[in-house]
Image (tube, helix red, strand yellow):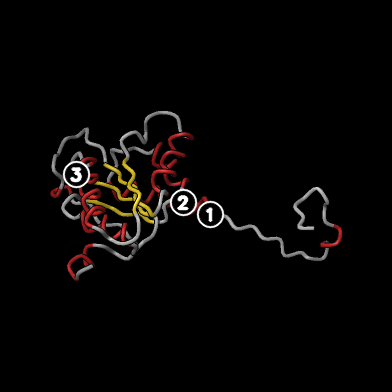
Amino acid sequence: MDAASAQVMPADGVASFHPSTARSDCATAKCGVVVIGHGGTASALLAAARGIVPGDGLADVLAIDAGAGETEELQARVCAAIDDVDEGRGILLIADLMGSSPCMCGIKNSFGHGFAVVTGLNLAMLTKLALADRGSTPRELANACAGSAQRAVCVKINDDLSNRDQADPQKCSTG
């Protein structure tokens, strides 16, 4: 990313939406959404979210499954997707890994559209997106999706090894 881009994209990964950069000032425009990830993650998670949440809240969301590296083919697909979803309200780019080639390709091609980026693509953020008000700004949608993803992460640990010999035989065993 060049120095000018670094000034626009803050460390939190959420760029400011500037209505003056929007292509239309239509009051009914929705924030467009592009989901991008390595392998089949983007399309698989989007399909899963569409299966979980009834309705058409994700019908116009586009998924891009990317390979390794920022290729000309990836750039063309990202450009086309961004142009397709931008109704004039800006776009939300949801990527799997911050700093990865697909994410950086999305960021580079989003300038001029008014956009926000949220990384850490997961099912929780997509289900939140399905129910969110897409008339919101890209920043508001990014924050809502990120908050949902953070709340969905849970770590539970049982460090009690004292009852190992009395383990329930119906539970997983390696013997």
Q: Amino acid at mark 3?
A: Asp
SS state under label 1: loop
Numbered mark located on residue 163 in the image: none
Residue at image point 77% right, 55% down: 173
The local secondary structure at tag 2 comes to helix
Residue at x 47% of width, y 46% of height: 124
Report the disc number at residue 149: 2
Relative image position of residue 52 (x, y in whole percent):
49, 35
- Category of crowding for the residue at label 1, using alpha-carbon neighbours closer than 10 angstroms: few (below 14), some (14–19), many (at least 20): few
Q: Residue at x 32, y 47 (%)?
A: 64
Mark 2 residue type: Ala
Q: Quadrant of the C terminus?
A: bottom right
The Cα–Cα distance between marks 3 and 2, rounded to whole angstroms, is 27 Å
Q: Answer above or below: position of 139 versus 59.
A: below
Question: Which residue is tagged 1?
Answer: 153
Mark 1 and mark 2: span between their CA atoms?
7 Å
Residue farthest right in this picture: 166
Q: Quadrant of residue 137?
A: top left
Furthest residue to the top? 55
Lateral position of residue 79 relative to residue 63, left or right? left
Residue 83's mark? 3
Q: Observer-nearest residue: 172 or 146?
A: 172
Viewer-side residue, 72 vs 127:
72
Crowdedness of circle 3 by 10 Å Cα count: few (<14), some, many (20+)?
some
Q: Is residue 126 left or right of residue 71?
A: right
